[in-house]
Image (cartoon, rainbow, N blue to C red):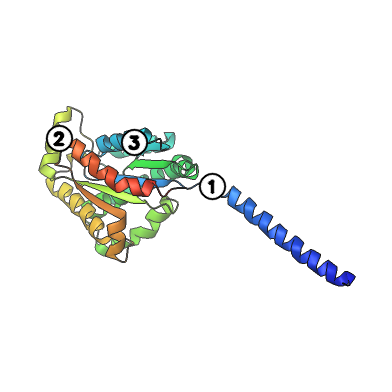
Amino acid sequence: MTTRTKTQKTGRATGRATKQTAGQATRQAQPRVGRLIVLEGIDGAGKSTQARLLVQRLRQAKVPCLFSHEPGGTAGAEALRELLLHPPRGGWSTTSEIFLFLAARNEHVRRKVRPALEQGKVVVLDRFSDSTLAYQGFGGEMTPRARAALAPILAQAADGLRPDLTIVLDLPVSAAGRRIGMRGEKRTDFEKRGTAWANRVRRGFLAMARHGGITARTRIFAARRYRVIDARLAPKEQSEQIWRAVRPIVSQRR
């Protein structure tokens, strides 16, 4: 065997070893990926209650998890939340509301949600991008073309994150109003907007669940990403249905 042949073989072997080492290093450097579970629905549907119950189930199953809400979740986003829920006299225009929500979401995602997902946690959110489309898009009576134009802006504000599963808690507006009244708390600006507006928001959530959201092209995607739960059911039954939908998704995380 010539010196040149030996050198060529040694070079190939070294190259393979280098590639294997680089591949192993790349795999080790890749962050663990968690799962993003979102609960949506009109005010009074019971999202916060079911989110807390879901987090309890996850912790009982020894699944690392994080619960948060929108708007809010970080100091900056909470400051914007106050502006949105208790606006100055005269309120905000629909466009102004959208940009305030998007600013709060971007802060929340970059500082809290994405880091938790990269740690391999299951993140449970009370509201996400679909709420902006339902409340400002459908509730604000934007045209279908205007709602479609929101898609890239929503994606950018969410830093490209999309939920692995969206649970829509569906409740008639009249029932939701009674629940809100029973709280004995000061109503937010959104809770004061009336039945017609709330019905448009509800229809928006159901439309997204049927069609897979604003960017989906097939109903197959809708069937995978969305679950609609009847929020008139007893809280325990709702929780069981949510857990059945969440469990297989949680088991797929790495």
Image coordinates for residue 98, horizontal then vertical, percent? 33, 49
Judging by the rendered image, the residue that carries numbered circle 2 is: 179
Helix, strand or loop for disc 1: loop
Q: Position of 104 compared to 170: left or right? A: right
Mark positioned earlier in the residue sequence (3 or 2): 3
Q: Residue at x 17, y 43 (%)?
A: 231
Mark positioned earlier in the residue sequence (2 or 1): 1
Q: Residue at x 22, y 38 (%)?
A: 46
Which of 153/10 is in front?
Answer: 10
Judging by the rendered image, the residue that carries numbered circle 1 is: 31
Q: Position of 116 compared to 22: left or right? A: left
Helix, strand or loop for disc 2: helix
The mark closer to the camera, 2 or 1, is 1
Q: In which quarter of the view is residue 153 placed? A: bottom left
Which of 207/19 is in front?
Answer: 19
Mark positioned earlier in the residue sequence (3 or 1): 1
Which of 196/227 is in front?
Answer: 227
- Mark 1 neighbour class, 10 Å CA radius: few under 14, some 14 to 19, many 20 or more: some
Helix, strand or loop for disc 3: helix
Which of 158/121 is in front?
Answer: 121
The mark closer to the camera, 3 or 2, is 3
Judging by the rendered image, the residue that carries numbered circle 3 is: 55
Disc 2 marks a residue whose amino acid type is Arg
Disc 1 marks a residue whose amino acid type is Pro
- Residue 67, compared with residue 3, is above or below; it is above
Pointer 3 with pointer 1, Cβ within 8 A: no
- Residue 198, compared with residue 224, is above or below; it is above
Disc 2/disc 1 C-alpha distance (Å): 42 Å
Disc 3/disc 1 C-alpha distance (Å): 23 Å
